[in-house]
Amino acid sequence: MSPTSGPDVINGWKIVTTEETVVESYSLETTMTVTTEYSDGTKTQSKTCTTTKKDSSVVTGLTTKQVHSVYGQDISCISKQLNLMLKDNSLAADYLPVDEVSLYTGMLDGILLCAMVNLLQPDTIDLSAVTRRSDLNNCPPENAEQLKIQNRNLGFCLLKPLGVSIDSLKVQEMLEKGCVFALTSILIQVLRLTTIGRMNFKEHEVLVYLFDGWSNPEEAREILATGREEMLLRWVNYQMKQAGTDLEVKEVGKSLADCSIYANLLWAVCPIAKRGALMPIGDVLKPDSFVTRAERVISNASKLNIADVITPQHIAHAGEETDTIAGLHRVSLNAAFLYNIFSSYPNIKVPKMKTPTPSTDADAVVDESLREQLRSWCKRGASEETLIRWLNSFGPSDPVQSIESDLCNGSVLLQVWEAMIPGSVAWSK
């Protein structure tokens, strides 16, 4: 079974935050529920965190221990990934490198939210529109809090059309009550958009060469409709074939847990000159413990300068409890790790062009011409940019990044129609 793609599902997941209850005069208990919706019903599981409210303002006394008690090492891993992505981002400079606590602090200040906007769409926010950290620290607390709210509202407003689903009023209400973890769903969505969300032809034209045997524009359009996760998995399976193994991955989940895919993938993409530094596949997979295997996978990745934005436990337990917050985070972090491997070592064979002759190379010329047309379809102008922002403002389950590729199956258009006229789409059909 696969998740449905109705209007309330975010990247295949429905994220709901409910049950805020004041436990003591200065404490707030919040139950956060993540559900995956299937065609035969809904699976749910809850996870509860308690945060401390100081006066009537947003909590600033967050500790690493509190974050770990709720999310384990998940936020630490997300922080590492964001440090990589934000290293050249001017708005984020005052907070880098971020850790579990400073990440939430920067989001509460609103500045890191604005930095994430520019990460998703460069130069969207001018630096002068954001109240910087030094200015926040040099004004009275009541004024600083108002300026932080303005920063956050700016970030919320501009993240939504870029594909991040946010109920800004609900989030702000929870922040005022003290639950900083209301911001976590934004982190997960930004993580996915900046990793697996970039598995498309516009970001990586070389992906065109993963598809063989097509010869006309209609087939090309079907290729353009390939989903982001499907594209990532197609690349992994391409590498498995290059490695001469029958292994195949069908989802970012259980098939990764025993590390066979990871071990073969790293060996396949590694330049031959560097293989001597890696632990051989057989040695990686020798231990019975999946955690030990995962440690060796991460060690090999580190030797290839691939960032270790994942823990052995995230790999060893991939695909478990996928209807929980922890399960959702494991899926997202494994997808991010796969993307980091791809972006470091794409290892896709690009055919060399030859001087054509009428008798032997006519088909090759036609094939390359169609590939060039496919690549050209991935470019967009200002008017298309405006349309994409408008479509994303409705919060579709898969954010739109390309009109040509992301509207092909009609799912986004149906979700927009449902948002405009509730009840107008018969999702069961």
Image (spheres, helix red, strand yellow):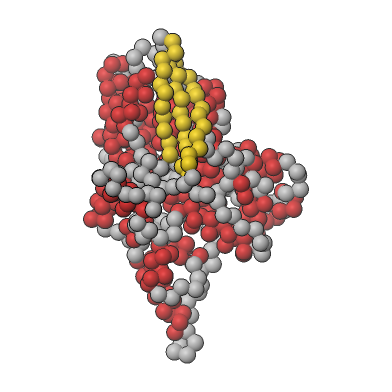
Residue 169 vertical position relative to residue 217 in the rendered view, above or below:
above
**Left or right: 394 as drawn, with respect to 270:** left
**Left or right: 13 as drawn, with respect to 318:** left
Position in image of residue 231 (x %, y %): 48, 57
Position in image of residue 337 (x %, y %): 55, 46
**11 vs 281, nearest the viewer:** 11
Residue 19 vertical position relative to residue 326 in the rendered view, above or below:
above
Q: Residue furthest bottom?
A: 359
Q: Is residue 298 visible?
A: no
* Number of numbered discs overlaid on the protein picture: 0
**330 vs 47, nearest the viewer:** 47
Residue that appears at 30% across and 20% down: 145
**Left or right: 125 as drawn, with respect to 70:** left
Q: Is residue 378 visible?
A: yes
Residue 415 vertical position relative to residue 79 in the rendered view, above or below:
below
Picture quadrant of residue 8: top left
Residue that appears at 46% across and 25% down: 31
Residue that appears at 51% across and 65% down: 210
Residue that appears at 37% across and 49% down: 427
**104 vs 192, nearest the viewer:** 192
Position in image of residue 187 (x %, y %): 43, 36
Q: Residue furthest left?
A: 383
**92 vs 243, nearest the viewer:** 243
